[in-house]
Amino acid sequence: MKNNLRLNKIKGITVIRCALSGGKGVAKLWLFGSEFDFTTLSLLKKRFYEQYLLVSTITLRGMMRENHIKKLDVLKMDIEGEEYKVIKKDIKLISKNVERLLVEYHEDCDRKMRKKIISILIKNNFSVIFEKRNVLGFSNNQIIK
């Protein structure tokens, strides 16, 4: 990520290396292969994944607190099935402090997850602004007028 930003001369982006989850603790980050041009990392065990790394997990609230972040312009979550847990755990924080939210979902694993994500965010003043290839885009109606 940092190399990509540097190569493209993009400034004003902060990369925070952490594993967001619905709770603070330790999780197995499952690995498959050594190439990064396809999905190779997952917090969810897949039957063909054989190796893992232990990683520290943190809640969104904890990550923001540790990094002295009060507001997020854009929060993109592609955290392999943990998206709903993070949203549910910190929905009040998200509704007050996140302008736009991009959420990847894995419809092939759980068709109900998409509906749950949309439902909780709409109940908390977000609007769906787009959906494309398993990514939902939301805008916070409370912050963005």
Image (cartoon, rainbow, N blue to C red):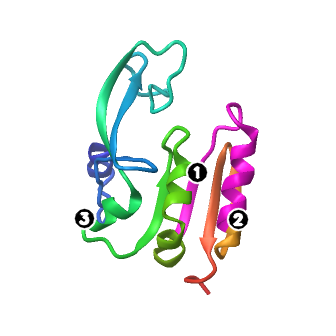
Left or right: residue 8 compared with residue 88: left
Residue pushed farthest bottom? Answer: 145
The label nearer to you, 2 versus 1, is: 1
Q: Position of residue 3 (x, y in %)?
A: 27, 43
Classify 10 Å Cα crowding around label 2: few (below 14), some (14-19), many (20 and above).
some
Residue type, numbered disc 3:
Asn
Q: Give the residue at mark 1.
A: 84
Question: Residue at point 58% right, 51% down?
Answer: 84
Q: Give the residue at mark 2.
A: 128
Residue 112 colored magenta?
yes
Q: Do the numbered discs 2 and 1 sit on residues whose CB atoms are within 8 Å?
A: no
Q: Give the residue at mark 3.
A: 67
The label nearer to you, 3 versus 2, is: 3
**Real-space Cα distance between discs 1 and 3?**
22 Å
On residue 143, the disc is none
Bounds of the magenta segment = 100-121
Classify 10 Å Cα crowding around label 3: few (below 14), some (14-19), many (20 and above).
few
| 69 up-or-down from 14: above or below | below
Residue type, numbered disc 1:
Tyr
Q: Position of residue 29 (x, y in %)?
A: 38, 29
Q: Find residue 109 and report its image quarter.
A: top right
**Callout 3: SS:** loop
